Image: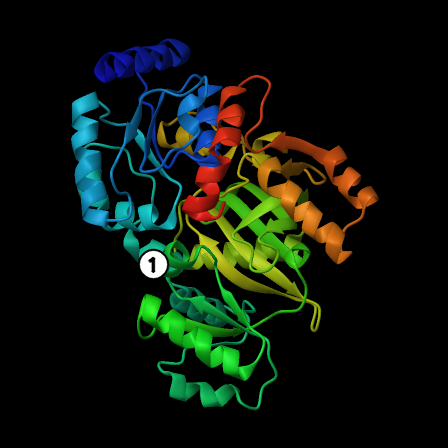
Amino acid sequence: MANATSTLLEQSASDRFGTKIAGAVILGGDYQGLGIVRSLGRHGVPTCIVDDEHSIARYSRYAGPAVHFSNLKDERHTVDELLSLGRRLGLEGWLLYPTRDELVAAISRYRDELSQVFRVATPEWESVQWAWDKRNTYRLAAQLGIPIPATSYPSSVAELEQFDELAPPFAIKPAIKEHFVYATRVKAWCAESHAELRTLFQKAYEIVGPGEVMVQEVIPGGGSQQYSYCAFFREGEAVGSMVAKRRRQHPLQFGRASTFVETIEQPELEEMSARFLRAIDYYGLVEMEYKLDPRDGKFKMLDVNARTWGYHTLGASAGVDFSYMLFADQMGLPISPGKARPGVGWLRTTTDIPTVFLEFLAGSLGPRGYLRSLGMCRTEAVFSLQDPLPGLVELLLIPYLAVKRGF
């Protein structure tokens, strides 16, 4: 049945473009993967969704076959299963879209092997390693003159003595976040005292092992101080780009995901980000995260995501359809360069509602500010009148998502 479905979907793409064009395999079917399915589906591009969780993208009107893998965290297992799936369903030449960092790493490391069946846009490991490991990210950023938070890499609790003369709070983060996030469901811990720093460092050390625990200064300000540069980057230039401000996030401190985002103009972030991406000879979709430090007025680089990101669908509403732009480039189709227009909002209602409630209690958001954000929203992460079923399914999955990944 899957073979027949795949053939029919590929034929629909062939009719659309007047030539035989393959489709896309989306690895991860949450709201991020759903955004890719919808973007490509609106252009008549067939998709196959692969996930190891109960996810919503498979219920989209644009979705093709959905395949469950037992595990997408083990690189070798994922690669073997993908190769088997591609040959079984006749997906030769289909483009791979990873939605998680561990999938980016697996595809990059086994790029040559996967390219025997699929079309692989993920760059070689020589490029991806600078995004995968924050130790590499921060080292290169410093060499390029891009500001970063003050960061240390203690190898033991004894080495925490260097912080005794510094005032808390401190952030305890992993250098490779996947080794930490799945165990804790958070991106970082905040130590409010030196005693707590030692306790949390030891816990992090036991999770990720020696050398991977970072202790970092906490830049003042909440999620509203965070900014991102997003792009389809090719041959040293951004073909499509967007700068966004994270107005709200979940959780409130060290947010794992945005709940409300707005496009803005910020040339400084564009210049710094392009400098970094040129240095690593980057190709593809990318999101680079920054935080504005009110103490010196500088944007400090926090993270680089070598893939689509949670709110990538904001781009299409603001004039830059990132997912389709990558697909078109890979297939040799014409691309219109673009830059997102400012003042366009994106919302994920299921996580924004509890976030807004907490911000109301904290006094950091009032009714007028909330209504203003709703007024500029042009994209909801999941809910769509044209494609309603994924939104209904997500409501049913809220208990599962809360237990599985803390949303």
SS type, badge 1: helix
**Residue type beneath disc 1:** Gln
Residue at 40 percent of width and 81 percent of height: 154
Residue 373: percent from left, percent from top: 74, 40
Residue 25 position in % (x across, y down): 32, 30
Task: Report the residue marked by disc 1.
Answer: 129
Total label count? Answer: 1
**Left or right, residue 248 beside residue 289:** right
Please provide percent x and percent y for residue 292: 65, 63
Q: Is residue 176 above or below residue 107?
A: below
Q: Is 112 drawn above or below residue 295 in the view shown?
A: above
Quadrant of the rendered image containing residue 377: top right
Depicted 68 relative to depicted 229: above or below: above
Residue at 63% over, 37% down = 346
Pick the residue in front: 117 or 236: 117
Which of the 4 quarters of the picture holds residue 29?
A: top left
Instruction: Pick whichever, 126 or 392, lies toward us.
Output: 392
In the drawing, does residue 234 fall left or right of residue 341? Answer: left
Q: Quadrant of the N terminus?
A: top left
For the residue pair 118 and 102, the one nearer the viewer reads as: 102
Note whether residue 216 is visible. Answer: yes
